Amino acid sequence: MKRASIYCSEAAYTRFDGALDKVHQAIGDETPRHVAVSAPLEAAADQAGEVTRKLAKQHAEALAARLEALKQQADSTD
């Protein structure tokens, strides 16, 4: 077992905490909370590839928009 602190948005934490409550209620109070915490973390880890692709696409789109804005600014100063 490992104790860890993470930094995330308040909305993400609220959703995660709610999911933990649901998992813990479904599997019963006799199951240790660390078991309930581990399951969604493992499920999230399984989605790392898809999450990476989504974030990379969003980042590329933001960079493309920024580049276009810089090009327009450079063209307007000529």
Image (spheres, rainbow, N blue to C red):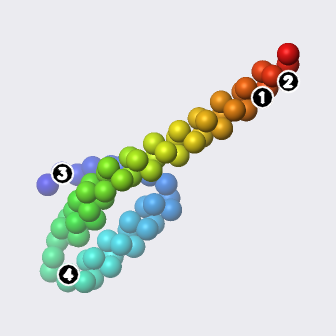
Vertical relation: 2 (above or below) 65: below
Q: Which of the pair 46/39 is nearer the observer?
A: 46
* Residue for point 59% across, 35% down: 63
Task: Report whether 66 appears left or right of 10.
Answer: right
Q: Which residue is mark 3?
A: 2
Q: Which residue is mark 4?
A: 27
Q: Which mark is residue 76?
A: 2
Task: Report whether 68 appears left or right of 38.
Answer: right
Task: Report whether 75 appears left or right of 49.
Answer: right
CA distance separating discs 4 and 3: 21 Å
- Front: mark 3 or 1: 1
Amino acid found under the numbered disc labelled 1: Gln
Secondary structure at badge 3 equals loop
- Front: mark 4 or 3: 4
CA distance separating discs 4 and 1: 57 Å
Amino acid found under the numbered disc labelled 3: Lys
* Residue for point 33% across, 76% down: 21
Q: x, y (%) of residue 62?
A: 60, 40
Whichever of labels 4 and 2 marks the residue nearer the N terminus, that label is: 4
Whichever of labels 4 and 1 marks the residue nearer the N terminus, that label is: 4
Labels 3 and 1 touching (C-beta < 8 A): no
